[in-house]
Every structure is written in structure tokens, then in C-alpha cells.
Image: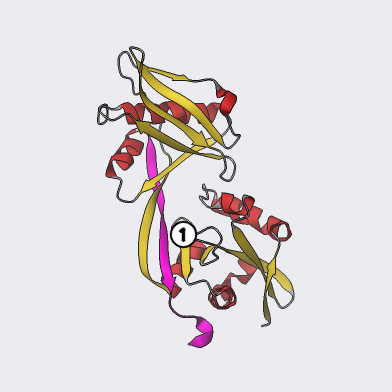
Amino acid sequence: MELQIIKIGLNEIKPFRELFLHGNNFQFVHNKCHEYGWADTWLFLIDGNKAGYGSVWGVEKREDRDAIFEFYLTPPFRKHASLVFSQFADATGAPFIECQTNDALLSSMLYEFAQNINAESILFEDHFHTNLAIPGVIFGRESPDNDTGADVSGYFLNQNGEVLATGGFMLNYNKPYADIYMEVKEGFRRSGLGALIVQELKREIYLSGRLPAARCNIANTASKATLLKAGFKVCGHIVKGTIVHSVSSL
């Protein structure tokens, strides 16, 4: 088998990225890395055939290229995944793998090639509809004039003229997903306001023709509880590990 790994422009692997996103069918947190120029991409040729691609980015600094975060092979070539990944890691010199555990292919490479594996974030997908309400609390939105296109902001919970919580959602993820963020004002936390505004943001996202998603830090138990109460469920984690060996050197 002849394997070539060639650094290439994003447009030249666009059909493979579409297959990657369609096949996985989840919010891909690092999708914006491509759109903002934070990643480099490599094409895999096996016996002269386009077999897939891989991408690297910087986990701490955007200008670095030290982590493999995307790895895709079309099904006919997946029997060669270990060898391709090994040589891809050698070609890029990336010391880390960063992936979502709901990405089965790259996760399998993580467990095969990495050590010191740690979960950094929890990923959520919508699971059920809720009907939460707090007497006297109103959901609303400020003027959308300041929208950037990626950030749909300005939503709030108000009671007796006082804003108790704010939030919005980001659109710079792969379609059709939108990523929720929110904050409850200090002094009003642990009163159900977080789950209420998340519930209402989910509704706004569906009305906009998108699917709600969310994530939080692995140690943020309060946010996790809030998202679960608002109808989300855990669908994966973002994990990172250090690459320690390659098939070609075994």
C-alpha cells in the first residue's frame, strides 16, 4: 500500500468534511477553527485514491498546530486507520490529540496512541421538552441590532424590572446546531432561573430553524445540573491526550 499525506487547502477536502459532519450527526465544537483559519488540513492518498483527511490546530495558542482534532477516512479505507493516523501524526509532529468522544473514529485513535487522557468539557444534546415557569419572571430580548451573525445575544429573564439572568446562542458551529450560553446574576442562583432561561433559549433556537446544543467545563457541576434540568442529556466529552508512539516505529 502506498500512502501519501499532503498538506492541502480546506476547499479541496470539503466533500470529505461534509461526509464527516453528516456521518457523525452531532455538534462539532471545533468546526469554527476551519472557518477562522485556525487549522491546517492534510489529504490522505492511498494508492493514488483520495481516502480522507486530517486537521490540526493549537490547543492553547491559535497560531500553534500541536493537536490533531479531526481525522476522517471513508469506510473502504478505515481498515488502514491505525497506519494512516500514525503517519499523519509523524507528518504533522503534533504532540496531542483533542477530540469529542462521540467521534468514534478519532476516539479510537486517541485510546490507541495517547496517554494522560483527560476530559475537559461535557457535551450536551437536546433530549426532552420542559415546561418550567417561575411566577413573575418574564423572558425577553433586547434589540437585536447588535447581532454579529455568529452571536445571537440579548436574551434575559426579568422580574419586577430587574434583570436576573442573561443568555444567547452561538451559530458558528456546524449547521444546524446552535450552542447555548447563559449567566444568572449573583444572588439569584440556585433558584431555577438558569434552567428556565435555557428552556426558553432552546425554544428560540428551534424557532430559528436550528438544533440546540450546549457544553460546560467538566468541573462545573452547577451548569451540568442546570442543562439536565432544562431537558438536555450528556452526549459526549471533549478529551485530550498526549501522543506517545506510532505504528511505524513499533
Residue 42 appears in the rendering: yes
Report whether 216 appears left or right of 66.
left
Q: How is the image coloured?
A: secondary structure
Q: Quadrant of residue 140?
A: top left
Q: Residue at x 36, y 58 (%)?
A: 119
Pick the front one: 19 or 160: 160
Is 240 one of the magenta-colored residues?
yes
Which residue in the protein does label 1 denote?
60
Q: Residue 101, image x and y in percent? A: 43, 58
- Decide whether the magenta segment is chiefly helix, strand or loop: strand
Q: Residue 41, image x and y in percent? A: 64, 64
Report whether 51 appears left or right of 28.
right
Q: Quadrant of residue 177?
A: top right
Pick the quarter of the image with the N terminus.
bottom right
**How many marks overall?**
1
Give the extent of the magenta segment: 231-250
Residue 73 appears in the rendering: no
